[in-house]
């Protein structure tokens, strides 16, 4: 693909980095430390998107992505995944760029890549969704998490302030109608960390404004973002844990997911250790290991019995992690 075409593709497709400015988005501005951390995450995402859109192959993009600072590199791969999913959906990338990313340099970032693919759903016609959704029966739900984040981040009034709930039963992709609503709420919960700029009191107040049956999944997303993206210290994380109340197991489960994502990519930070200690009562490595230990004998996602679609393997996985953390006494 000629260099001028790559440059044009990058320029046309890449979101404006100013879209990551919290003030422009109308988000809470929070502390300087929180605002810097979250805006840097967004800028790294856009940088990753540009790297994918402006290069020929995932291997070429990875040469740029790997120059992103370790604490922000996962966001860069997330952005690259969105770019490949968008290009696949629009027939602009030569075909299956997302699959090549997952099979190649994106493999250590598999969780973030699945989330990034879900962002693309918010930018593509629904008739193209099936073409870009990842095929992994366990991790595909992370794409819906990514879609939920995208909608809450860019359509904040509707998805956060008005608390809109998706009708996934009407989606043109089979098999997502049951648990899909909950996976989307997990992404909305992650986005709340950015919308409220890591202000844990504001995050908790916003979660409390949602119907009770949605709060568990929202807190799961909050725990993941609080651990992966950071922006707070021990006192704030402890206050978040108290705010979560009955939803502490979900909060801790999200934190354990974040630890696993960072551990697999070799990107564990001091903040990861702090957050898992506060929210899970475990080290980052122990929290990550726990997520692996409960993977055995998950249910078959092809199960067609009544109610099976409401509780796929991914849901059982999350429930087992939360149950283990509850037994350890922190929750």
Image (spheres, grey):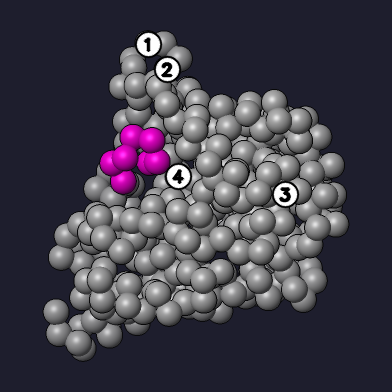
Pair 3/1: label in front: 3
Residue 17, numbered circle: none
Q: Secondary structure at mark 3?
A: helix
Q: Quadrant of residue 79?
A: bottom left
C-alpha gap between disc 1 and disc 4: 23 Å
Residue 258: x %, y % from top left: 57, 51
Residue that carries the numbered disc 2 in the rendered image? 308
Residue that carries the numbered disc 4 in the rendered image? 142
**First of labels 3, 1 by sequence position:** 3
Is 63 displayed left or right of 294 in the figure?
left
Q: Pointer 3 and pointer 2: residues touching (CB < 8 Å)?
A: no
Residue 305, numbered circle: 1
Q: Please state the extent of the stretch shown in magenta in the rendering.
A: 134-140
- The residue located at (75%, 73%) in the rendering is 33
Residue that carries the numbered disc 3 in the rendered image? 277
**First of labels 3, 2 by sequence position:** 3
- The residue located at (25%, 55%) in the rendering is 103
Circle 4 crowding by C-alpha within 10 Å: few under 14, some 14–19, many from 20: many
Q: Is residue 313 in view?
A: yes
Residue 243: x %, y % from top left: 83, 42
C-alpha gap between disc 4 and disc 2: 18 Å
C-alpha gap between disc 4 and disc 3: 24 Å
Q: Secondary structure at mark 2?
A: helix
**First of labels 1, 4 by sequence position:** 4
Residue in the foreground of this view, choosing between 87 and 274: 274
Circle 1 crowding by C-alpha within 10 Å: few under 14, some 14–19, many from 20: few
Q: Quadrant of the C terminus?
A: top right
- Residue 229 inside the magenta-drawn segment: no
Q: Secondary structure at mark 1?
A: loop
């Amino acid at each position: 693909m000629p260099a001028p075409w790559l440059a044009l593709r990058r320029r046309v497709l890449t979101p404006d980095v100013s879209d990551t400015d919290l003030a422009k988005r109308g988000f809470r501005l929070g502390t300087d430390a929180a605002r810097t951390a979250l805006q840097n995450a967004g800028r790294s995402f856009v940088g990753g998107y540009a790297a994918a859109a402006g290069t020929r192959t995932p291997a070429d993009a990875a040469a740029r992505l790997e120059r992103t600072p370790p604490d922000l590199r996962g966001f860069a791969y997330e952005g690259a995944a969105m770019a490949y999913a968008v290009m696949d959906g629009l027939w602009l990338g030569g075909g299956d760029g997302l699959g090549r990313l997952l099979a190649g340099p994106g493999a250590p970032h598999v969780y973030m890549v699945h989330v990034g693919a879900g962002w693309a759903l918010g930018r593509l016609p629904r008739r193209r969704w099936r073409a870009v959704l990842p095929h992994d029966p366990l991790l595909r739900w992370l794409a819906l998490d990514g879609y939920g984040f995208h909608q809450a981040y860019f359509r904040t009034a509707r998805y956060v302030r008005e608390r809109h709930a998706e009708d996934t039963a009407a989606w043109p992709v089979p098999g997502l109608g049951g648990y899909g609503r909950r996976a989307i709420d997990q992404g909305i919960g992650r986005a709340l960390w950015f919308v409220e700029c890591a202000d844990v009191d504001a995050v908790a107040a916003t979660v409390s404004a949602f119907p009770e049956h949605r709060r568990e999944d929202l807190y799961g997303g909050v725990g993941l973002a609080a651990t992966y993206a950071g922006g707070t210290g021990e006192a704030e994380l402890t206050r978040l844990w108290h705010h979560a109340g009955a939803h502490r197991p979900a909060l801790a489960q999200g934190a354990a997911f974040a630890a696993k994502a960072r551990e697999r990519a070799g990107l564990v930070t001091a903040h990861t250790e702090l957050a898992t200690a506060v929210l899970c009562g475990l080290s980052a490595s122990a929290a990550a290991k726990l997520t692996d230990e409960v993977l055995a004998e998950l249910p078959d996602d092809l199960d067609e019995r009544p109610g099976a679609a409401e509780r796929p393997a991914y849901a059982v996985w999350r429930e087992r992690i939360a149950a283990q953390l509850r037994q350890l006494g922190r929750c």
